[in-house]
Amino acid sequence: MTDEPTPPAAPPGRRHRLLRTAGAAAVGLASAAAALGAGELVAYATGAPTAPVIAVGSAAIDLTPTPLKEYAVRTFGTHDKAVLLGGIYLTMTLLAALAGLLAVRRPLAGAAVFGAFGALGAWAALSRPGAAAADCAPSIVAGLVGATAVLLLARLWRRALSTAATPRPGTAEVGETVERPEDTEAEVPSPPVGLTSRRTVLAATAGTFTAGALAGLGGRALTDRRYDVTAARDAVRLPAPAAPLPPLPVAVHPNVPGLSPFTTPNADFYRVDTALTIPKIDPRDWTLRVHGLVDRPQLLTFDELLREPLEELDHTLSCVSNEVGGPYVGTTRWLGAALPALLRRAGVRAGADQLVGRSKDGMTIGTPLESVLDGRRALLAVAMNGEALPLAHGFPCRSVVPGFYGYTSATKWLVDLEVTTFAAFDPYWVRRGWDRTGAVRTASRIEVPAPFAKVPAGGVDVAGTAWATHRGIAAVEVRVDEGPWQQAELAADAGPDLWRQWSYRWPAATPGTHRIEVRATDATGAVQPESRAAPFPAGATGWHSTVVTVT
Ligand SMILES: Nc1nc2c(c(=O)[nH]1)N[C@H]1C(S)=C(S)[C@@H](COP(=O)(O)O)O[C@H]1N2
Ligand SMILES: [Mo]
């Protein structure tokens, strides 16, 4: 046992100041909870995208400069939205605490912070494409509730402090600090001594916080339920295709363990979009407007769309943001109405060269019109892999045009098609510097062996996928440690709109670390270039490689 002296107790003044700071921060946090809770409740009437945090987050996504957005997609992948929302909540927590500190000294200034927040949210909600005037209501109510809460709580707080600062004989409990006059902030005018106890103000602060949190969670749950369309999706009866495709031949897959399946299950299909909340569209309310440079504008309901002769299309969709070797690519069997037939019915006028799809949430995606009409199979898709489109993949209808990255062809939650010109309109991503054509670049990736795998010497199965959507893959080559290129064996060809899987049996003789590289040749004879390009602005280039250890 050491004989240490007991440390001196913290001077009562400092402990008191600490408590006072924490309390003031709590006043700010409770007011913020009340504000957000009120906002979520009002969003029940105006829809989930109008809730303050979602509105601000959506505006933030649209305002994020392209390099930062690329960084976020690269670093956080499909978790980028969770990271953004987490960042917003964290920032708001800090600012709310600061607003509380401000409010106990200058109540009106604290209230003004909440007013400013409300105004920011209102502006964000009104700036969303297709916003209605009422969409600012959740944020305005949130601002007012936050400002009121902080005024009331700060007042209680100041009363409690001044009560404590003026001890009456016998009122201080054992161990309770009695504030000395020099601790009182000079700028705080002493309100009249009331009977407000610390217990009252703590209860009021905690109560406000709890009520706000419950209102927020409850409001969000109610809103989700009110706009839920899963039942409507389950009720969709998909008509049989007019000309069904035969099943894909088994031989499209080299049957190497660990290689991804040829057709991507819906649940594993990559998701890339800017939607913080998935647009909820009831097919009974859905219409598709076709207009612009056409002779006969069209308006289709979902029932009318389903009465069109439906076609199946096996197709590999990929994202321009996919890095070399990356996961943002998938293959599916779409079902939908022929897009070229619909455009012909509308009567495309001479001079038009761009087809712009608009989504319910205001995304705009532009495709070269001549490609849509050049004989390729382009669809207004309603199903993937025999199921109505999953909500995250565009229910009830999206466009699909083989040969183009998603950002120039595959509008999810599609509600409007405009025939126009490239000169007249820049879609969302083009305005942010991306290539306006967005044709898929040839890509290939090694999936087996896994990176840094340890493999026994002998015959090692190397396998992967390659795609040059709408051109098709003619060859895949593999080389080890920059030796001579070897032809990989291509699995069966299911058509140019699909990826092609490949395998190569590598006679791995030398133990140690080896680097395997892959490159593909598309059906035009163009070999994938070695030079690395980042996804921005027209898609990544370069050879994928993987490092393995032979034991
Ligand atoms: N409404 C809407 N449609 C969209 C997008 C979007 O952000 N909003 N992203 C596009 C992009 S960049 C890609 S790669 C594909 C991805 O489709 P998926 O999420 O079904 O895989 O959708 C496209 N369609
Ligand atoms: Mo994309």
Image: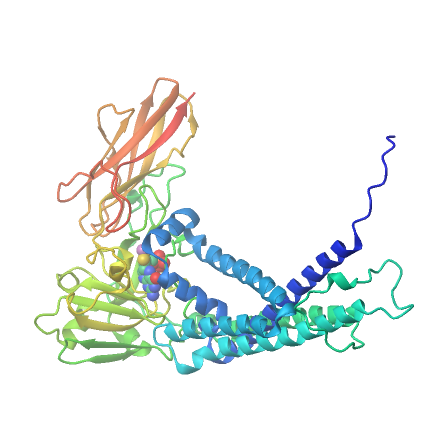
**If the picture is divided into quarters, which one holds ligand 1?**
bottom left
Expressed as whole percent of the image width and height from the top left, the position of residue 73 reads 38, 51
Left or right of 308 in this view: 137: right
* Horizontal side, residue 89 vs residue 66: left or right: right
The x and y percentages for residue 502 are: 28, 38
Residue 336 visible, this orientation: yes
Q: Which residue lies furthest to the left in this view?
A: 350
164 left or right of 187?
A: right
Task: Return the x and y of residue 248 as percentages of the image width and height.
Answer: 29, 51
Residue 415 in picture, x, y percent from top left: 30, 73
Towards the viewer: 275 or 239: 275
Q: In this view, does 304 lie above or below 181?
A: below
> Is 198 above or below relative to 527?
below
Residue 331 in view in this figure: no
**How did the renderer colour the structure?**
rainbow
Q: In percent of the image, x 68 and y 70: which residue is there?
A: 188
Q: In the displayed structure, would residue 69 be above or below residue 337?
A: above
Which residue is nearer to you in this view: 542 or 253? 542
Front-most of residues 92 and 444: 92
Q: Residue at x 46, y 57 (%)?
A: 84
Query: Residue 306's image quarter?
Result: bottom left
Name the outermost residue toward the right. Answer: 170
Count how many numbered circles sit on residues in the image: 0
The residue positioned 42% from the left and 30% from the top of the image is 452
Q: In this view, does 17 lie to the left or right of 41?
A: right
Which quadrant: the C terminus? Answer: top left
State the quadrant of the N terminus.
top right
- Between residue 449 and residue 247, name the one nearer to us: 449
